[in-house]
Image: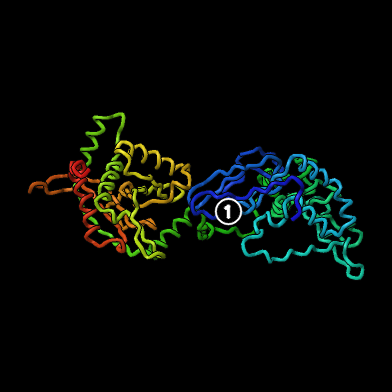
Amino acid sequence: MTTVTGDQVFLLPDLGEGLTEAEIVQWRVAVGDVVTVDQIVVEVETAKAVVDVPCPYAGRVVALHGAVGEVRPVGRPLVTVASLDAATRDAGAVADAGAVADAEPSGHATYREEERAGSGNVLIGYGTGPGDTGRRRRRARPTAASASPTRPVAPEPPIRPAGPPSAGSAGPPSSAGSGPAPRPSGSAGGGSPVISPIVRRLAREHGLDPTTLTGTGPGGVVRRSDVEAAVAAADTPTAARTPPSALTPASGPVPSGPPAAEDVVIPLTGVRKAIADKLSRSRREIPEVTIWVDVDATGLTQTRAAINAARPDQPVSLLALLARICLSGLRRYPQLNARVDGEGQRIVQSAGVHLGIAAQTDRGLLVPVLRDAQRLTTAELAVALAETTAAARTGTLPPARLTGGTFTLNNYGVFGVDGSTPIINHPEAALLGVGRIVDKPWVVDGQLAVRKVTQLSLTFDHRVCDGGVAGGFLRHVADCVEQPALLVAAV
C-alpha cells in the first residue's frame, strides 16, 4: 500500500494479559479530525473490560480501520494519522484529480483516491485479516469513457439524493442525449470531493450522492458528519412535508392487529462471549463436585454489629468477614488454593491467595481479583472489596485485575436465593457460595429458636482433593460462621 509521506499507522496495542482482540464500541474521532498525542480516539471492549485507547501520534486522521461492532486483532491497524502538512497536501491534491482521471483509466483513479483515504476496502469492515492475504482486488467496473468502442457500455444511473422526486423525473432518463456518465464519488469533475471510502459507503447505504453535498472538511472534502446531517434532514417526519390531501386514509383495507413478533438476536461478543467460553471450558475440563451445609449465622451478624459499633469509622461488611473466614480455611486446606496443569500433568498450589469476588454488572458476571488477600487485615479487606466491586460495576477496572484468581467467593444470596451449584471459575479449583441469610427455626441447646440461617455450598475440582479435604474446609468455614471466636483461635 502506498501512503502519503508522514503517515503514522497506530496498531491496536496489547490491552492486558492473554487478550488477543478487541471489539470497537465507539469511535471518538472521524476521518479529517485533528488529534493530539495521547488523545482518546476509540473505545473498545475486550473480554475483560471496556477500554479507552489513546493515540500516540499527532496530526490529521486519514483512516479509521474498522467499523463499530467489528473485532480487531491485537497488532492490526487501528487509526492512520498524517502530519498536518501531509494531510493538507493530500486534501489539496483532490483539485487536480480531474486531470489525473483524464490521463489514467478510471479504475486507476479510483484506486488512487482509496490510497489517499487509507487503502480503500480495508477500512470499511471487510479488510484483510489473518490468512486472507490471497484475496484478489475487485476489478474496477468500466465506465463509458474507458469502454471499448466495439463494446459499448450503458452508463449507470446516478445515485439520487433522498427526498421527494423533482418535477419531470417520474420516468427513467432516455438513453439518447442523456449526457456523459456520472463520475464516481470523489472525482474532481463537479461536485464536492469525497476521499473516505467510509463516507462513500455511508452515503450509498442511505441513497445519497455524496458529490451533491456541501463538504465541511479541508478543501471542501465531504466528511462523515456531512452525510449524517443530510440523512437527518431527509428523515424529518413525513407529515411535516406531505400535503394535507395526502394524509387522508386510503380507501383500501387496513391491516388490523399488532405486527407479528420477531425473535431477538443477541450477538455473543465481548464480555458475554468470554463468560460463555470460560464456563463452557470449565464444564468440559473440570470434574466438579458440590457439597453444602446449612449454618446458623446469628453469631456472625452479631459480631459484625459489634465491630461496626466499636469502630464506626472503619465499618466491615458480611462479605469481608466471609472473605476472612475463607482465607483462614485456605491456610488450613491449601489443596483448594490450586489449579491443575493438564499439559504438565501436575497440580500447582499457589503461594498466595488471589481472592476472586463474583460481581454482577450491567456487562455481565465479572470476577475481580484481590491479589495476596491473605496479607490484608479485615478492615483492609472491607475497603478493598468495596472499591473493587464498585469499579467492576462501573467498568473502570483494568484487565489485569480480572485475571489470575486462585479461589472465588460468590455471594449469590443478594439475589434472594438460598443455594446453587456454581461453576468453578477456570482454572481455579474451588468456589464457595453463600446464600441469603433469613430467619428460620433452629434448635439451640435442645430448644427451638428463631435464628439467622444461611446455606454454604462448596464446588471443588475432584482432581485436586477428595471429599475429606473439601468437607473439612466447608466444615471449618461453617464453624467460624456459627462461632466467630474460632476465627481468632485459628489465626
Q: Is residue 4 left or right of residue 406?
A: right
Q: Nearer the viewer, residue 155 or 275?
A: 275
Q: Residues within 10 Å of mark 1 (few under 14, many from 20)?
A: some
Question: In the current view of this chain or complex, which residue is farthest to the bottom?
Answer: 150
Pointer 1 residue: 74
Q: Is residue 195 left or right of residue 443?
A: right
Q: Which residue is located at x 28 percent, y 60 percent?
A: 290
Question: In the current view of this chain or complex, which residue is farthest to the left?
Answer: 446
Q: Is residue 96 left or right of residue 247?
A: right
Q: Position of residue 80 (x, y in %)?
A: 68, 48
Colouring method of the image: rainbow
Q: Quadrant of the C terminus?
A: top left
Count up the numbered dots. Answer: 1
Q: Is residue 395 left or right of residue 421?
A: right
Q: Nearer the viewer, residue 410 or 162?
A: 410
- Under mark 1, the amino acid is Val
Q: Quadrant of the N terminus?
A: bottom right
Q: Which residue is located at x 72 percent, y 43 percent?
A: 32
Q: Which residue is located at x 77 percent, y 44 percent?
A: 221
Q: Position of residue 452 (x, y in %)?
A: 20, 44
Q: Position of residue 432 (x, y in %)?
A: 30, 52
Q: Is residue 238 visible?
A: no
Tell me if residue 333 comes above or below residue 385 in the rendering.
Answer: below
Tell me if residue 17 comes above or below residue 60 in the rendering.
Answer: below
Q: Position of residue 223 (x, y in %)?
A: 73, 44
Image-quadrant location for residue 389: top left
Q: Is residue 120 visible?
A: yes
